[in-house]
Image (tube, grey):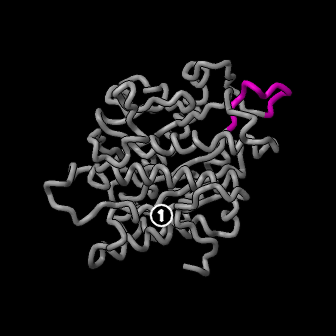
Amino acid sequence: SSSTTTTTAENDYRQTLWNETTQDFVQSDRVYLRFQNGVDRAAAAGPLTVGKESGFAYPGRFGVEATLGLTLQESLRRYQNSRHNRDDNNHPPEDEIIYLIKTAWGGKSLAVDFRPPASGQGPYDDDDVKPSDYGTKYRQMVQEIRAGLDDLPNIIPHNYKNAPKGDDDDDNDKYEILGFVWFQGWNDMIDWRSVDEYDVNLVHLMGSVRQELDLPSLPVVVGELGNHGPQLPPGDAGRRVAALRLRQRLATLRHDQQATTRFVETARYAVVDIPDEEQYDGIHHYYGRAEPYFHIGRALADGLLQLLLPNREDVRNDTGQQSTVDEL
């Protein structure tokens, strides 16, 4: 998903995304991104930016990865210094780089396309779904994660080796996988069958990804399907949306998941009931507006930081996370 950018003086997000000195979109020197946008083109890779030529989204647009990366950049020093019991002010993160690997395909469901191995074959054969269709995007996602890790030394201008930290005594030039962010749900919402099994499939997805990466405690952040905003549509459609959101939340609140997952509310950021002339476009999620994607990216980063820095009072809590199933 992507959103239209604007650079007018009225834009509340200009200070974050726009560089007044260069008169261009901000380009991070601490966050890098890789995105395979289409099978017939080379992966877009390089410093995180919102510019038209970045290749990270359609021209003139950006996804949640923009402010997710910039927000993590602000907090990277706190995380690293907290792990090593260092004082924030005396240890700038001069050698710490954030590397995001983005995978995204429209019109795909967790029930079929992203179906993880642990979920087995689904019950959708009567919808012209072949057995080989189950999990195609899950497998491609894993392949792109591995390709992105292999490509890391070619993307980041530092002496990083494509091996995780902990493989030997010299970890200064290694990477550490800090989290997995899942933001999806529209195509599961349109069918009660996929709604009803969403939480089970999501738990299996998180477990399968952790197994693929050999990281059983990998932090996972789940973004809510918030397109409709807080006010749900009437009738059966609204009931499906509410049920899917609940199942997304429940998957993160299971007793075996609470310590390593966060559910992030996004409906609060949707801009709805606006005049047609103020809708940037009507074919992308959230009307393709910048505001929701800006805030959702920050909230997803906040969720990850809550998992990485659970005892830090200076980590923003803008996720809407609830602590127990009983509170639902």
Q: Quadrant of the C terminus?
A: bottom right
In the image, residue 109 sits, relative to residue 74, either above or below, namely below
Report the residue at 67% width, 25% height from top. Answer: 162
Q: Position of residue 249 (x, y in %)?
A: 53, 68
Q: Position of residue 150 (x, y in %)?
A: 60, 25
Q: Position of residue 305 (x, y in %)?
A: 62, 51
Seen as rendered, the residue at the extreme left is 277
**Principal SS element in the magenta part?**
loop
Left/right of residue 230 with respect to residue 79 in the rendered view: left
Please give the range of residues in magenta.
Answer: 166-176
Report the residue at 50% width, 69% height from top. Answer: 247
| CA neighbours of label 1 inside 10 A, class few (<14), some (14 to 19), many (20+) | many
Whether residue 147 is visible, yes or no, is no
Q: Nearer the viewer, residue 56 or 149?
A: 56
In the image, residue 15 sits, relative to residue 219, either above or below, namely above
Report the residue at 57% width, 51% height from top. Answer: 117
